[in-house]
Image (tube, rainbow, N blue to C red):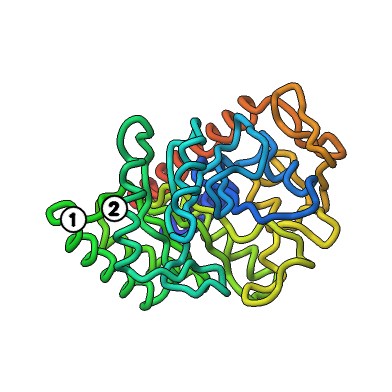
Amino acid sequence: MFDLYQQFLSLLLFLASLALSQSTTSDKRGLVYISTSHESDYSLLTSSNSDLTWYYNWAPSPSLRSQDNIAFVPLIHGISNLNSDVRAVKRQSDATHLLTFNEPDGSTDTGGSGISPSDAAEAYINFILPLRSNPHNLLISLPATTGSPRGLTWLRDFNTSCFRLNPGEGCPADFLGAHWYGSFAAMASWLGTLHVIYPDLPIWLTEFALPQADEDATVQFLNQSMRFLDELEYVERYSWFGSLRRSDAGGFVGENVALLDDSGGLTQLAVEYLGGAAKGFEVGMKGSEGGTTGSDGGTTGSDGGTTGSDGGTKGSAATIHGNRRLLVMFVLCVAGLIA
């Protein structure tokens, strides 16, 4: 009888792990827009069937035409064009959130904004904070530093400068931007560290990837990360780097972070990130030039494979996700009773 119970317990735990391993829908998932001459590259990535709900482009003005299914989030990258950047943000009447200062602890030649903590604090208080009040009422992020001890030092010095310039209030914010390039375990540790320092602020992981890994390891990292981030309550949004072709990738991150192959077809990474075969995505699928709009407001791929009822696919996926969670809870409860 004991052997029978052990076999049943093993079966239950197997079912639980299977349920957790399946792709799930997510309203946290976003897109880092990278400028390209291939318009069709984004017609599938931003289609209404995908799990992506928002995007940003390191700029205060949108790059894609307005779509109901994917919201634009403006970003003020640095302090060299503050007046014009703030004016551009004010023109985004549909915007609800604002990202600020991209990797201020990093150099400009690697994509950072290279701002001292004191200069950033002064600019934040004088230019950014007014956007948090009427009539704009934007939810504003603290700057997203590099995922490094240098980034933590910068945030500490920024906080000190904020309270020196604005005693009693500092630089109030609504969420915290974060970047990570590295292993899953180190990413989880980094997010945990940020949460300890800023326990009251949700985190937006606006760039993350596993650099210089092979394709299988990269896909495994993405799937593990998505399950983790979707369940982590204090992570509010996340976006993978990068939405580019393999031929345009390389350098620090390597080509296997790319969501598109050399000709603009979806990679396995993209299929997983967009929601999988259940949402109509397949490896090699391409978008159409000009971004043809379907009857549901979504974007049709060249084979028509991604059009359909957006409410139906997202709704059914959410139901499946809820059922999986219930299955896991049931399995673990029964396992506990018979163990």
* Mark 2 residue crowding within 10 angstroms, few (<14) / some (14–19) / many (20+): some
Determine whether, in the image, residue 57 is placed left or right of residue 42.
left
Q: Quadrant of residue 154?
A: bottom left
Residue contact at pointers 1 and 2, CB within 8 angstroms = yes
Secondary element under disc 2, as helix, strand or loop, is helix
Residue 43: x and y in percent read 75, 41
Q: Residue at x 44, y 60 (%)?
A: 79
Question: Which numbered circle lies on residue 166?
Answer: 1
Question: Where does the image place residue 27, in percent across and percent down from the top left?
Answer: 51, 40
Q: Nearer the viewer, residue 193 or 67?
A: 67
Name the residue rendered at 84%, 41% in the picture. 288
Numbered badge on residue 33: none
Q: Is residue 312 left or right of residue 195?
A: right
Corner quadrant of residue 308? top right
Q: Say what amino acid the circle numbered 2 marks.
A: Ile
Q: Nearer the viewer, residue 325 or 127?
A: 127
Q: Residue 309's x, y, as percent?
A: 69, 25
Residue annotated with mark 2: 125
Indicate the amino acid at tag 1.
Answer: Asn
Residue 173 seen in the current view: yes
